Image: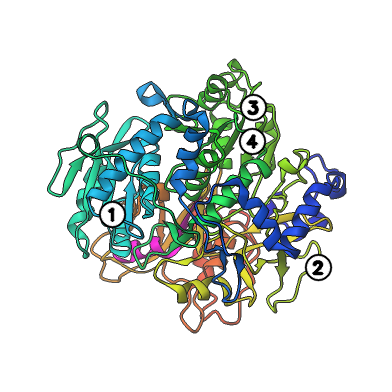
Amino acid sequence: MSIQLIASSKDLQNTDGSDYIVNSYHIPCPKYDEAHKESLENPERFWGEVAQCIDWSKPWKKVLDNTRQPFTKWFVGGELNACYNAIDRHVLAGNGHKVALIHDSPQISTIRKVTYNELLDKISLLAGALADMGVSKGDVVIIYMPLIPETIMAILATTRLGAVHSVVFGGFAANELASRINHAKPKVVIAASCGLEPSKIIRYTDMLNGAMKIITVKKPRCIVFQRRNIWESPLLEDQVDWDDVMKRSKPHPCQPVEANAPLYILYTSGTTGQPKGILRTVGGHLVSVCWTMKTVYNMDKDSIWWVASDMGWVVGHSYICYGPLLYGATSVMYEGKPDRTPDAEQYFRLIDQHRVNALFCVPTALRVIRRADPELLLGRKYSMKSLKTVFVAGEFCDYETKMWAEKAFKVPILNNWWQSETGHPITALCLGYGYSPSLPKYSTGLPIPGYHIDVLRENSSEAENHELGRIAIKLPLPPGCLSTLFQNDDKFEEIYFSKYPGYYDTMDVGYKDEFGYVYVMARDDDIINVAGHRLSTSALEDVVLAHPDVVDAAVIGVPDPTKGEIPLCLYIMKQEAKKNEKQINEELVARVRTLIGPIASFRIAAAVKALPRTRSGKIIRKSIANLARSMLIKISNAVEDPSVYVEIKEVLQKLGYAKLAPNPQ
């Protein structure tokens, strides 16, 4: 049974047919209970104590300023520097010889270990180079680089100056990069010459140069890190070589900033419209991610911690860069795929070779490995003795994959739930407080301290236990969550706080059980979760609608055994279309790949005569998505022409979906 189709956990059964009994999992944890209660009843005292996990150059005057919700401020008046906390303080404490980063790139057969000393030396010089180019407090630097240590150096060199970084995922095409440059108006762009995909090289500077041709703001200076052992890019005007500027520059000291100064901008999805940039502040973020390394993930200072993600996503920011380095641990950076660089044994090899203690990945990675090596003919060659836990987040983890992975890795597979907006987990098991690593089936855990979670009905009343509703977080949000949207306070309030006054609207649907465990069941209709990457349907539709032979379109998410979800597009052809459906489909796939990037996994499109619309003109996408999943569709009275579902069902069935779908009612 798919959890996404369950109406209530009361009807839930295990795969062996036995009843699901949640209380067999719940063992009281007094240390967690006390911490969670204290965090809600006395947040100033709780977070004031937690904040001692990092170093402050100037103490705060007030822990919490909640006078202007939802624009909560934490550690008001305190000053600190992110780079100092991630690097300098460990070196000053005598731990500079310790390995900070392990970069493993099997495609080019390299393993590189970078110490805290080496990071400090190179970051200081790069900060000096940025300062020479005019970067100072509050300025924006865009970073367009793959998963290499130099990306973290670029991030921390930016923060060393008190400037603001915005990392753009290297899989995004020139148009996407240009939209972010136009919006953020960076003084400098730091890029790599290329990135790696299985069996091919992605030339980043080609996309960078394309973006520079179409931006409408002042052209920023560019620093290019040449990966000379892979591909060296010819440098254009306003571009300088990373190595050259490092040779010319001098080390630059850390510049403290106020705790509520911006740390970074993270654009949450590809978009051809107005970008939505999450703005995170320095103090709250550093405190929360450093604290969760022990509290949630139970890591020690000498732990080897591996997050299988990219720096362009929130988990890369929080738990490849900031979390482990603030904590003083060692962070693994794996530049490869679960199954194709070169084979499905790589995750097992890394764990064994680098003595990894905890792995954090998306469930898709586990599904991919299972598909490629179901009997572990490759994986069983390696020892998993160092591994304690595998954490998964970013998408739904099906039970069969979880069970297989626990046998494969010989450790618990623990779900946790959070969002780009929160920057760290909302629900999890706080292993550092003494919880045993065991979760109720399908649960994402308990609220971590700082989060007051309610499940609300449409009328804002609180749902009963096991009753589905909108998951909402009572204000104030804890430290580390988004402070606003970059240059758009009004949109920030409208998107997240208008539906349920006094709450942050997660836009996720789920329920709680009688012990407070949270179950996340569904996501906002306008987001497709492709292998943990949240992509906007409107962004995809914008590309489709730009085709000269398309008059209307709807993009939905449909199930995929590997990626969890992939986009499916239904469109209406113009009557005077010059090309046939097959030609249009091929061009749409090519357009999305060019303008959004291959991460969208866009490959399914079909023409229909009409789409279901309300009388006000809104396309009812959820009904199409439910139909594709063979769910019963109850046609709303607001639908202008219910007969359109007949053809849509036929088209979906030809595409391999809606095979068991009952007729819409």
Q: As shown in the figure, which amino acid type bears the numbered disc 3? A: Leu
Quadrant of the rendered image containing residue 129: top left
Viewer-proximal residue among 399 and 475: 475
State which tag comes first along the sequence, 1 or 2: 1
Figure quadrant of the C terminus: bottom right
CA gap, disc 2 and disc 4: 35 Å
Label 4 Cα crowd, 10 Å radius (few <14 / some 14-19 / many 20+): many
The residue labelled by disc 1 is: 135
For label 2, the residue is: 464
Distance between mark 1 and mark 2 Cα atoms? 53 Å
Question: Amino acid type of disc 1?
Answer: Val
Q: How far apart are marks 1 and 3 (CA)?
A: 42 Å
Q: Is mark 2 on a helix, strand or loop?
A: loop
In percent of the image, x 70 and y 57: which residue is there? Answer: 46
Please state if 33 lies on the left or on the right of 204 as rendered.
right
Q: Quadrant of residue 218?
A: bottom left
Q: Name the residue under label 3.
A: 387
Q: What stretch is highlighted in magenta?
A: 533-546
Q: Outermost residue toward the bottom?
A: 615
Q: How crowded is mark 2: few (under 14 residues within 10 Å), some or many (20 or more)?
A: some
